[in-house]
Image (tube, rainbow, N blue to C red):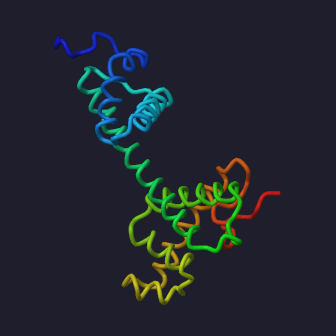
């Protein structure tokens, strides 16, 4: 047995003790921010608690934790890009049209959910959805833009709408994930 092997499958507590400081240091170097690094390191171990995995060696555990932490970094950067775009859009509006802080938070959350949903779609399906719903283009216009048939556009948009409906079902308060477009599923009372 190698010295880096675990004699028994490690508990999350053992993994935390063995790897938390290392992971937080790796994240701090990657992000350049100790606070974000601490948050993401904690998130990684919370995810490990929610979905335990078996590791036979320390290097195997570190490889998995690093891959998970890298994904958390990408998620953080995407959320910040969305937030920055939203703040720039707000700044371009006259102050009299500024939404309340609560409404801003709701819109930002919806944008992040939409971004996550679009990230789970093939590129053309995501583009078709954005063009059809966000840009109010016809199926024919979207088909010409993407070089596909109008039937394919309808399939792409339907797939995205199905994901929106699933997001809406999961929402705790029953609010539509896309308040500016027609509801993909009936509104709950």
- Asked if 146 appears above or below 179 in the picture, the reply is below
Furthest toward the right, the residue is 189
Q: Position of residue 148 (x, y in %)?
A: 39, 83
For the point 48% across and 85% down, which residue is it?
Answer: 150
In which image quadrant can residue 104 be found?
Answer: bottom right
Farthest residue, direction front: 95
Q: Quadrant of the image for the N terminus? A: top left
Which residue does the image show at 38% across and 49% down from the upper left?
A: 74
- In the image, taking residue 71 as reference, residue 117 lies left or right, namely right
Look at the picture and state if 23 lies above or below 182.
above
Asked whether 53 or 49 is in front, the reply is 49
Residue 177 against residue 24 in the figure, above or below: below
Residue 97 x/y as whole percent: 69, 72
- Depth order, front residue of 156/82: 82
Q: Quadrant of residue 136?
A: bottom right
Location of the C terminus (image quadrant): bottom right
67 vs 170, left or right, is left
Q: Residue at x 67, y 67 (%)?
A: 98
Whether residue 178 is situated above or below residue 36 in the rendered picture:
below
Q: How many marks?
A: 0
Determine the image quadrant of residue 108. Answer: bottom right
Q: Nearer the viewer, residue 154 or 72?
A: 72
Residue 46's spot in the image, x, y percent? 49, 29
């Amino acid at each position: 047995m190698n010295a880096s092997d675990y004699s028994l499958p490690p508990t999350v507590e053992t993994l935390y003790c063995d790897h938390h400081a290392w992971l937080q240091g790796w994240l701090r170097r990657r992000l350049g921010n100790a606070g974000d690094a601490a948050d993401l390191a904690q998130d990684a171990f919370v995810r490990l608690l929610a979905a335990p995995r078996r590791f036979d060696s320390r290097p195997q555990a570190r490889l998995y934790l690093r891959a998970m932490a890298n994904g958390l970094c990408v998620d953080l950067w995407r959320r910040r890009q969305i937030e920055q775009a939203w703040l720039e859009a707000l700044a371009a509006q006259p102050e009299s049209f500024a939404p309340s802080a609560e409404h801003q938070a709701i819109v930002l959350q919806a944008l992040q959910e939409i971004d996550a949903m679009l990230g789970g779609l093939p590129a053309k399906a995501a583009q078709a959805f954005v063009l059809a719903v966000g840009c109010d283009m016809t199926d024919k216009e979207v088909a010409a833009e993407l070089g596909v048939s109008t039937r394919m556009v309808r399939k792409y948009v339907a797939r995205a709408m199905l994901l929106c409906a699933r997001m809406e079902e999961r929402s705790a308060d029953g609010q539509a994930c896309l308040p500016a477009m027609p509801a993909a599923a009936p509104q709950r009372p």
